[in-house]
Image (spheres, grey):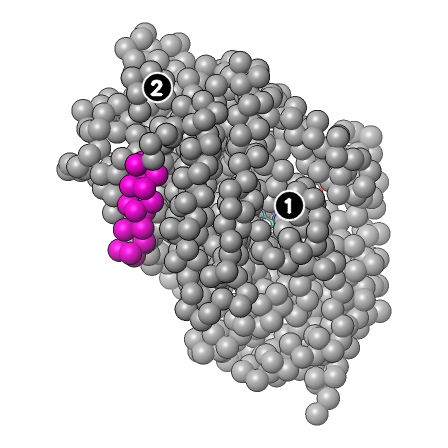
Amino acid sequence: MTSSTPSIGATVPGYPRIGPGRELKRALESYWSGASGRDELDAAARAERQRTWRRLTELGLDSVPSNTFSLYDQVLDAVVAAGAVPPRFSALGLDGLGTYFAMARGTSGAAPLEMTKWFDTNYHYLVPEIGPATRFHLDPTKPVSEYREALALGIETRPVLLGPASLLLLSKPADGAPHGFAPIERLDDLVAVYALLLTTLAAEGVAWVQLDEPAYVADRTPAELEALGRVYARLGALPERPSILVTSYFGPLGDALPVLASSPVEAIGLDLVAGSLPPGGVPGLDTKTVVAGVVDGRNVWRTDLDAALATLRALEPRAGAVAVGTSCSLLHVPYDLDAETSLDPRLRSWLAFADQKVAEVVALAAALRGGEPTPSFAEARTALTGRASAPDVIDDGVRSRLAGLTAADARRTPFAERAEAQRVRLGLPPLPTTTIGSFPQTGDIRRARAAVRTGRLDRAEYTARMRSEIERVIRLQEKLGLDVLVHGEPERNDMVQYFAEHLNGFVTTEHGWVQSYGSRCVRPPILYGDVSRPAPITVEWATYAQSLTERPVKGMLTGPVTILAWSFVRDDQPLGDTARQVALAIRDETVDLEAAGIAIVQVDEPALRELLPLRSVDRPAYLDWSVGAFRLATAGVADTTQVHTHLCYSEFGDVVAAIDGLDADVTSIEAARSRMEIVPDVAASGFARGIGPGVYDIHSPRVPSADEVEALLRRALAVIPGERLWVNPDCGLKTRTYEQVEPALAALVEAAWRVRRP
Ligand SMILES: Nc1nc2c(c(=O)[nH]1)N[C@@H](CNc1ccc(C(=O)N[C@@H](CCC(=O)N[C@@H](CCC(=O)N[C@@H](CCC(=O)O)C(=O)O)C(=O)O)C(=O)O)cc1)CN2
Ligand code: MET
Ligand SMILES: [Zn+2]
């Protein structure tokens, strides 16, 4: 670093990219459908990048990031930059963009890269496939052209890339890699490509580059820590390179901090919201710029600027220099609070979305430099005092109800007794067939919802349309011969937002879209106060569906952990306390469904795995409160009511014991994509209740044949007795079409019949 290198000052590690009005989502979906061409997509992408750089400059950042834009995913972008495209995609002979989308979405000839959760967030990344034969080679096109594009606007930027160690730690072994191979074994080869990239960027005139190493906020072996040191020793030793900022987020770096502090990098980004600097000396830190992530990049609360400034000041004597940032990329929050014109102004004053957070970072950096604290400090103080004393945040009724609970409220009678009572009541065949809940969300359904929102359709007409949709779904399931039916969830915009809209303690936004994967977005609700259920939510829909058929219809609810995981949660009390409040509201709903004659209630917990803490020391406490919340939500019903749950992630290893702890009568899990790989583990864990390993991969448009489903069922039957085995898809059908769903479910029912035959 030369004396002319600009200091970082105020910055952010990343920024949303889907567009404030979801412009990129629309451009992508239009391009994929063939309705528009390459030029339109390029124009939309360029417009979003340029808008972002201008906005961040206007808001006052000293160092503006680039290459944080992505047409699909930043991990996929790093795969492309490193040339690590798996051969099944390069063999397609497509151009760059065609290959890129083939990896993201698959083609008829090549299954896409696997998608999995980005740490403990609701963002999904594409999993790189790395083997001994992967031939890395530098493709600097994207970071270089984005840097030039910004420079042409007069904006000097800091290119951002996933760091080499994290890239490999987030990868999986390529097909055909020898048993025991780990992608990290290829680190030295990959670092050679990053070295070339840094040299290339230096030649472009880049002053700072940001390499993200979030994998080091999880537990890492000594060899992995050593590998991190090796990477940055080597990159740091390059004769011509930009200054290097290594960024971490979502937790404290732990043992990786001294490794980076003693490496030759110039700056280290720390998440000081999810973690804090350890007490005591960190050798080498006093020579680094610490980019202090004191503004929460994952939640929407306004920052306590006084407290953040105190943290920054306390850091000053320990670091070479202190710069200010958000705790992580702003990808995980909506763009701009100013778009939310219908929010209660008092609540609004407690919040900050991406642009407001950038302004907070700028204000903190200015105050740290010794300038006058801007008026925003006083405004923040007023807002926070208001929030702390707001009457509707605390609900004494909820609190006393929770205080009055005992362990018995979260306990059902032993499974064997319940199972017998349910067998008698339900009279289901062996290997009962069912689905996970949602049926396709058609354009008609979504348009009707948009119309009722804008007042173009009245409530009664909307309800009538949803009822006719439910009737269609019930008749279809009867025709297909399914045993346990669902109502199809047409009335739900989203399985979390829908419940939040009907519970006290939440508000929802109009424009607060956050990318979940590719072009798919969610509007996470904001949980700001004590939670309760003012009135039954799903009972009318469920009883209407049940009135249409003799077969049992499952009541369908979202569990407390998933509601929390996919919302912005309050930061003024432990998450476990909030979970119990949500659990009570869901418990009220299960009890009301039961009273209305519903015999089976499913409480989905797909996010149980997602919230699992990144460090193993923190896991037992999490599993304790999360499992406890689920049990509280479901233990209010009689033995004769069958409780189902649904989880849909491929990595179950870490939560197999917790699944047992949930004490649901039947658990459906995702299993088709891994061809039932997980089932022996579940059986070996001693799990002895009903289980429905998915036999239809709903993430793919492909329709499975009855033969395939039968083969999967026979595989499951090898380890699970027929009286406990359920037959169902991997997950809900909302993203599929009826043309795909009908034949797939027909195959599923046919396969169950074949396997049932003695
Ligand atoms: N919250 C949440 N997280 C989750 C999941 C989930 O289901 N929910 N599933 C997993 C995978 N993640 C997913 C996330 C989003 C979507 C998804 O399909 N999102 C939809 C939006 C869903 C929604 O909120 N729909 C609303 C609003 C739809 C909309 O865009 N309406 C149009 C108008 C209607 C039209 O013309 O189509 C508009 O507002 O402009 C509704 O149905 O009411 C999308 O991006 O397209 C799927 C999976 C993990 N995380
Ligand atoms: C992401 S889990 C989805 C469960 C929900 N009941 C559905 O079928 O859509
Ligand atoms: Zn699911």
Label 1 sits on a secondary structure element that is: helix
Q: Which residue is drawn at the image coordinates 57% and 15% (left, top)?
A: 153
Q: Is residue 200 above or below residue 546?
A: above
Q: Which residue is drawn at the image coordinates 30% and 47% (left, top)?
A: 230
673 on left or right of 312: right
Q: Is residue 161 magenta?
A: no
Mark 1 → mark 2, Cα distance in angstroms: 35 Å
Main SS, magenta region, reads: helix
On the rendered image, what quadrant is the N terminus found in? top left
Outermost residue, left side? 280
User: Neighbour class for label 1 at 10 Å: few (<14), some, many (≥20)?
Assistant: many
Q: Which mark is residue 100?
A: 1
In front here: 220 or 109? 109
Q: Quadrant of residue 391?
A: top left
Q: Is residue 382 above or below residue 286?
A: above
In front here: 682 or 368? 368
Q: Amino acid at mark 2?
A: Thr
Q: Position of residue 85 (x, y in %)?
A: 58, 51
Q: Position of residue 484 (x, y in %)?
A: 71, 69
Give the mark nearest the N terminus, 1 or 2. Answer: 2
Extent of the magenta region? 221-237
Q: Position of residue 609 (x, y in %)?
A: 47, 56
Residue linked to disc 2:
5
Label 2 sits on a secondary structure element that is: loop
Q: Position of residue 526 (x, y in %)?
A: 52, 35
